[in-house]
Image (cartoon, rainbow, N blue to C red):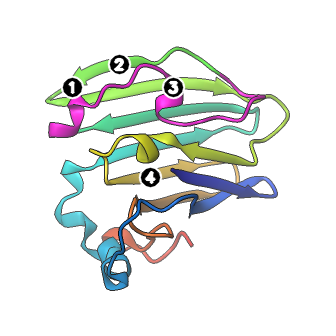
Amino acid sequence: MQLIERSGWVLLGLALLGGCGREVDKSFCALHGSEHWQHREQQAQLLIDYAESGDMAVQLTLPGELAAVPLASPGDILALPEHCEAGALLRESEAGMQVFRFGARCGDVLPESLSVSLLGERLEVQEIEVSMSTPAVRKHFVVHRDCERAMFNIDGESDGE
């Protein structure tokens, strides 16, 4: 399972909560972000838009073979804190992809963290490209289940850490 944390008013990054039991060559994690573009169309993409009002819009796109991953509720994608209320999970098919959308309300209490339960429970999903925006910052990174940190500098980007 992956965790998205915030510091102050900003969601900052991802830290691995638990390993998957196999050892990985650290050079893979060091290089994979810069090579991600070569297979990004085959990977899951997660968009999180967090508004200052406490409203969150989440969209998950599962392409190709990943489109068959069964998801029944917003909790299958993100494990939100108890004070957040998630809306219904909407599912659409678009050009061989499954797109899942839901909204959540967290009110005046900003989440300390968001757990990406999709990586912890669905072995088919090895990595997720994440685009996250808050009123203060915009981040774009890749999370791979075998790497202990998020990979920034994808697609030639140097910002985001």
Name, please, the residue furthest toward the front: 21
Q: Residue at x 21, y 25 (%)?
A: 94
Q: Nearer the viewer, mark 3 or mark 2?
A: 3
> Closer to the N terminus: mark 4 or mark 1?
1
Regarding mark 2 in the picture, which secondary structure is present there?
strand
Measured as percent of width and height from the top left, residue 125 is found at 31, 47
Which stretch is magenta?
64-85
- Name the amino acid, label 1: Glu
Regarding mark 4 in the picture, which secondary structure is present there?
strand
- Name the amino acid, label 4: Val
Frontmost residue, 161 versus 43: 43
- Are discs 2 and 4 less than 8 Å apart at CB? no
Residue beneath label 2, please?
Answer: 91
**In whole angstroms, how far apart are the C-alphas of marks 3 and 2?**
11 Å
Q: Residue at x 59, y 36 (%)?
A: 79
Name, please, the residue furthest toward the bottom: 27
Residue beneath label 1, please?
Answer: 94
Which numbered circle lies on residue 130?
Answer: 4
- Name the amino acid, label 3: Pro
Note whether 147 is above or below 100 in the view shown: below
